[in-house]
Amino acid sequence: MKTKSWPITKNQGFTLLEVVITLIVGSVLGAILVQFMGTSMKNSFEPVIMVENGFGVNEIMEKMNSDYKRLLLTSTVNPLADFKDDVDNGMIPPPNDPYPYFGEYTSTTEYIVFNISGDEVPDATELRILKVIITHGNQSVTALFTR
């Protein structure tokens, strides 16, 4: 006994309506994908720049720490005041100085003390704690240096 599975017809294929609907749906999905990927691709470099700036500011701070340790051993008068001068003039090395300076940055330096409640207060008399804020790119690092 013969059984028929599906009737075979000569008119197999897609209709024009099915093709048009498929193209419209595909183009809408493609536009959404391009919009999403375009924004992601346009801003994809920002984390890399932030990491580079973070490494740069850390490298500058490490050089400053090294310079301050050197000044603690070699300075005869006040190593903290000498270090403050180095940080404030960090991009311009003095002549005949064997130690390279730190690199490109902006800095804020001030002498501070801590009051009884633990808040920092600017101080121009004791000159024992130097607060240094270094900014490189869009990253900042704050450090305290003491005598």
Image (spheres, helix red, strand yellow):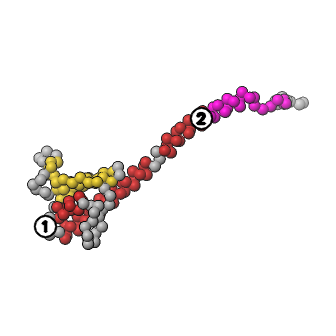
Residue drawn at (56%, 38%), measured in percent from left and top? 33
What's the amino acid at mark 2? Leu
User: Seen in the image, is 113 located left or right of residue 24?
Assistant: left
Quadrant location of the C terminus in the rendered image: bottom left
Mark 2 against mark 1, which lies toward the viewer?
1
Q: Which residue is labeled 1 in the image?
A: 77
Q: Position of residue 57 (x, y in %)?
A: 33, 56
Q: CA distance from mark 2 to mark 1?
A: 72 Å
* 14, above or below 109, in the image: above
Assign a secondary structure to mark 2.
helix
Q: Position of residue 67 (x, y in %)?
A: 25, 65
Which region of the structure is painted magenta?
Answer: 8-27
Residue drawn at (13%, 51%), measured in percent from left and top? 123
Residue 88, located in which quarter of the rendered image?
bottom left
Residue neighbourhood size for the residue with mark 1, other residues' Cα within 10 Å, grouped as few (<14), some (14–19), many (≥20) = few
Quadrant location of the N terminus in the rendered image: top right
Residue 29's disc is: 2
Assign a secondary structure to mark 1.
loop
Residue drawn at (53%, 41%), measured in percent from left and top? 37
Whether residue 62 is visible to the viewer of this picture, yes or no, is no
